[in-house]
Amino acid sequence: MNLTLQGQPHERVSVSGDITTTLRVPVGWADRRFRVATSDGTLLLGTYNEGSYRFAVEVEGAAITRVRNTGASDVVTLDWAVEWITISDVEDSALTVRLPEPLPLFGQL
């Protein structure tokens, strides 16, 4: 019940674990950024630069997400049952801005 993502040559990201596939990184993007979303609610921001892939967690989902730097590229491991995964250009997505809710100091005594 886990998923591993790793950058591959020719602008591809390999997925192994609960789902086994290869995702094509969107081409034609100027800033070399893309997003990966999974069914547990995790949203990753990926960057590609001269054959090297870097990942950062933008939204934490239910999975325990680990990003390991292996030198040339990052390897992402999600420890959770993942039903689906998708990849998109960074411009084709939107995020909700979540502000922290204030805690009541004393409430009704």
Image: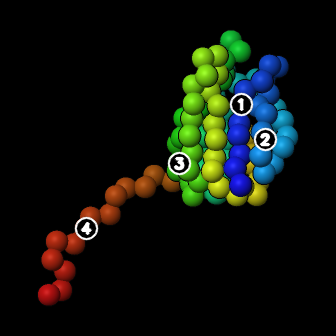
Q: CA distance from mark 3 to mark 4?
A: 22 Å
Secondary element type, mark 1? strand
Q: Nearer the viewer, mark 1 or mark 4?
A: 1
User: Between 26 and 51, which is closer to the camera in this rendering?
Assistant: 51
On residue 96, the disc is none
Query: Do we see residue 91 in this rendering?
Result: no
Q: Do labels 2 and 4 touch, CB within 8 Å?
A: no
Amino acid at the residue labelled 3: Val
Instruction: Point out the tag, 2 or 1, that comes first from the N-terminus.
Output: 1
Please give the name of the residue rendered at 78% of the width and 51% of the height, measured from the top-left corner: 18
Instruction: Point out the tag, 2 or 3, that comes first from the N-terminus.
Output: 2
Q: CA distance from mark 2 to mark 4?
A: 41 Å
Please give the name of the residue rendered at 56% of the width and 50% of the height, measured from the top-left corner: 64
Instruction: Point out the tag, 1 or 4, that comes first from the N-terminus.
Output: 1
Q: Which residue is mark 3?
A: 59
Amino acid at the residue labelled 2: Ser
Please give the name of the residue rendered at 15% of the width and 77% of the height, measured from the top-left corner: 106
Q: Which residue is mark 1?
A: 6
Q: CA distance from mark 2 to mark 1?
A: 9 Å
Q: Can you name the residue that lies furthest to the top here?
A: 50
Instruction: Point out the tag, 1 or 3, that comes first from the N-terminus.
Output: 1
Q: CA distance from mark 1 to mark 4?
A: 40 Å
Q: In the image, is 49 to the left or to the right of 107?
A: right
Q: Nearer the viewer, mark 2 or mark 4?
A: 2
Q: CA distance from mark 2 to mark 3?
A: 21 Å
Q: Do labels 2 and 1 touch, CB within 8 Å?
A: yes
Q: Which residue is mark 2?
A: 16
Using a 10 Å C-alpha cutoff, classify the residue at mark 1 as few (fewer than 14 neighbours), some (14 to 19) or many (20 or more). Answer: some
On residue 103, the disc is 4
**Residue 49 coordinates in the image, percent (x, y):** 65, 16
